Image (cartoon, coloured by chain):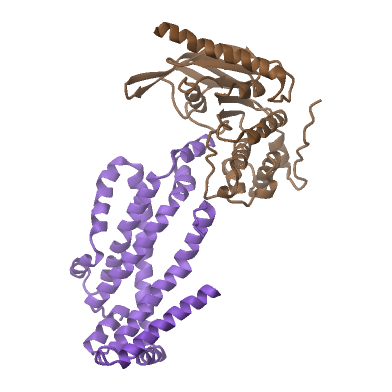
Amino acid sequence: MKRFLWSLLFFAGLVLLWELAVRARIWSPVLLPPPLQVIEYLRSAVADGTLWQASFITVKRLVLGYLIGLIGGVPLGLLTARWRVLHDTMGTLALGLQTLPSVCWVPLALLWFGQSEAAMLFVVVMGTLWSVVIATDTGVRHVPPIYRRAALTMGSKGFHLWLTVILPAAFPFIVSGMKQGWAFAWRSLMAAEIFVTILTGFGLGQLLHYGRELNAMDQVIAIMFVIVMIGLLADKTFFAPVERFLHRRWGTSQT
Amino acid sequence: MYVTHTFKIPRSASSAVEEELQIVSPSKLQVDRVSKTFRGRTGPITALDQVSLRVSEGEFVCLVGESGCGKSTLLNLIAGLERPDSGTVTADGLRVTSPGRERLVMFQEPALFPWLDVLGNVLFGLKMKPNLTPKDRKDVARYYLELVGLTRFERANIHELSGGMKQRVALARALAPNPRMLLMDEPFAALDALTREQLYGDLQEIWEARRKTIIFVTHNVREAACLGDRVLLFSPHPGRIRQEFEIHLPRPRDINSVDLAEHASEITRTLKGFKNGKREVAE
């Protein structure tokens, strides 16, 4: 409760500073609208459904692409960890592509898929996939050999060994790869949405972009706020519980 | 008379569980002239040179020697975790070529899986046994947790246990699939003296109750004399079995008893003899 009060106080202070900055007239109110105006935009966008629709479209693209990235990335990482030849080929490719900011895929995606959902999906998958491959590969390489030996003497081998020992032992690494993949996917999707208008649906990135075109800074700030909230929500509802579980099980918690 | 706990089979247990817990069939082992050489930094190291060994059903054999004498290598060969360069390992008439749950290994580190709780760890090996329902497996696992005195901790995480408790869980995990042979590689070496002494008692008691063939590697002579029916002395470079002692003391044995100390000091003298002999050769 005390922790909650502290964070509440902190954010209330931020909003207060913002309001003071507006009142001080350092910048024109067109460039920096007061908090109330932003809230007013949010209220109206919620009321007419724009915000829900845009959030839904964006989150749908993100979740779908992210899941494809995960479903492809974990097995691919296991394969590169299992066979040296795959590690030297596929693994090196993954490492290279992971360093490529995934927004760089946007031009290619547009040429390949046109201004379509497929292009959006492709960019998100590219953002997720390589981080997950690298993290899974690294995780498997860090599994203490004694676990494998213990499992072998208990009669586990082959696929069973990988599924019940190697994969769970590498799980802490995989989760941090998943977090990184999520962050990359989120960034690349926003960049792609700001860049490209997809006629099958307006996402949050597009709303942000039109806010700028219309010089509606209240809209820009409000959408930025929503993007931050979605990021926080994903972390608090999905990653945080998984990490808490890991810390509790493995005994790696600091607090 | 040796006072044992009566380890009760759970009342709710199905007939499959009772049957499972009543099977007691220790293994017979034969090792014929096995050799194993490793490539070391300064050239090949002969870890084992033409080592032969016979262990009969239900026997408790301790392998003793200084580090690097090949005793752990021999254990790995028997487990099937490594293959000999020459010679054969035969368990119950079948040649050992790969690890299998008939011969479970307990390592110096507990090697418990941190992603599973205590019960999950004990269940791991059991899950590969067919003919048991999930509930049966749990009953069997709980039986072994009771055997090592950790019933109350079945839901605990591994990191919450002390070193001694971890080794107890590892013992329960190794016993649960009912292997015919238990291979123990210095399992108590990392524990404090008090915990260790308690585990000597427990291990003897469990051995009485479950009758396994046990091969126990250690460099602690007293430990070997306390636990083993036979103690085999290894000498290094190349690794060979140099001498054999039979320990005819009544069980349960107390590690601090005078009789046991006499046996231990005799073994220690012989061990020192190997070293002095080698020094003379070197000079």
Above or below — where is A29 with respect to B91?
below
Give the quarter of the figure containing the N terminus of chain B.
Answer: top right
Residue A71 at x, y percent in the picture: 38, 58
Give the quarter of the figure containing the C terminus of chain B.
Answer: top left
The colour assigned to chain B within the rendered structure: brown
Residue B93 in view of the camera: no
Q: Is residue A183 left or right of residue B117?
A: left
Residue B3 at x, y percent in the picture: 79, 30
Residue A24, picture quadrant: bottom left
Residue A176, picture quadrant: bottom left
Residue in the image at 48% along x and 40% along y: A147
Residue A12 in view of the camera: yes
Residue A188 at x, y percent in the picture: 28, 69
Residue B156 at x, y percent in the picture: 61, 51
Q: Is residue B247 left or right of residue A36?
A: right
Above or below — where is B83 with respect to A102?
above
Residue in the image at 25% along x and 77% along y: A194
In-front residue for pair A179/A247: A247
Q: Is residue B25 left or right of residue A235?
A: right
In-front residue for pair A223/B270: B270
In-front residue for pair B269/A100: B269
Residue in the image at 30% along x and 57% along y: A130
Residue in the image at 32% along x and 46% along y: A80
Give the total number of marks visible in the rendering: 0
Q: Which chain is purple?
A: A
